[in-house]
Image (cartoon, helix red, strand yellow):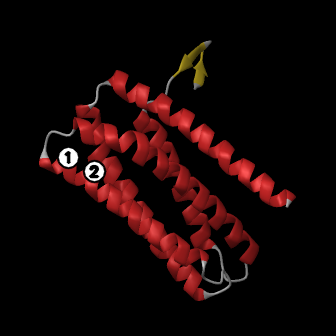
Amino acid sequence: MLKAKGRAVQKDAIALLKEDHVKVRGLLDELEKTTEKAKSRREELLEEIERELKIHTTIEEEIFYPAFREAAVKKDDRKLYYEAIEEHHVVDTVLPELKGTDVGTEVFGAKAKVLKDLVEHHAEEEETEMFPRARKLLDREKLLQLGDEMAQAKASLTESVLSKLVEMVRT
């Protein structure tokens, strides 16, 4: 939560998700600008991108999407839900392939570009179609409640990931 003049300001679910989109887009842009010579930087960026995507997709799939689906009244709304789930699946397929590619090759650069395109398409669709529909289907109170749940889940997932990394470093 942010503080504004002594009081806490809640972020709604959509604001939280949009912040994630901005962060991941920035990381993907940075990855795309790297060259075959920047092996360690590519590895670092890929690790951070994977972590951010896993946390983001988890809170979307476990908290935001179910609330959207439950509120969906039109077939087009349900279609947005199912497309979003499938787009996550495609990213989950491409990411391991990218991780299995030598970061010092042009092939890595090409696969990184494909991942970036997939994520950007998905985020754009959410921001221009799903989120405006969610604002109509879910009242402000519900979006704030979802934002709180998602922020807590995100903090917990981040802590869990960091604990695993610390444990890996120790062994």
Identity, as a three-letter code, of the amino acid under mark 1: Asp
* Label placed on residue 45: none
Contact between marks 1 and 2 (CB within 8 A): the answer is: yes
Answer above or below: position of 4 versus 125: above
In this image, 64 relative to 37: left or right? Answer: left
Q: Residue furthest bottom?
A: 106
> Which residue is drawn at the image coordinates 65% and 63% (left, top)?
47
> Which residue is drawn at the image coordinates 58% and 81% (left, top)?
108
* Label placed on residue 81: 2
Check disc 2 and report its element: helix, strand or loop: helix
Within 10 Å of disc 2 (Cα), the crowding (few <14, some 14-19, many 20+) is: some
Answer above or below: position of 141 versus 29: above
Q: Quadrant of the C terminus?
A: bottom right
> Which residue is drawn at the image coordinates 53% and 56% (left, top)?
53
> Which residue is drawn at the image coordinates 42% and 35% (left, top)?
13
Q: Residue furthest left?
A: 74
**Number of marks present in the image shown:** 2
Answer above or below: position of 91 versus 109: above
Within 10 Å of disc 1 (Cα), the crowding (few <14, some 14-19, many 20+) is: some
Identity, as a three-letter code, of the amino acid under mark 2: Tyr
CA separation, marks 1 and 2? 6 Å
Q: Position of residue 115 (x, y in %)?
A: 48, 70
Q: Position of residue 147 (x, y in %)?
A: 46, 32
Q: Position of residue 40 (x, y in %)?
A: 75, 73
Q: Quadrant of the N terminus?
A: top right
In this image, 2 relative to 138: left or right? Answer: right
Inspect this view and state whether residue 133 appears. Answer: no
Q: Which one is nearer the viewer's eye here, 168 or 68?
A: 168
Q: Which residue is mark 1?
A: 77
Q: Residue furthest top?
A: 6
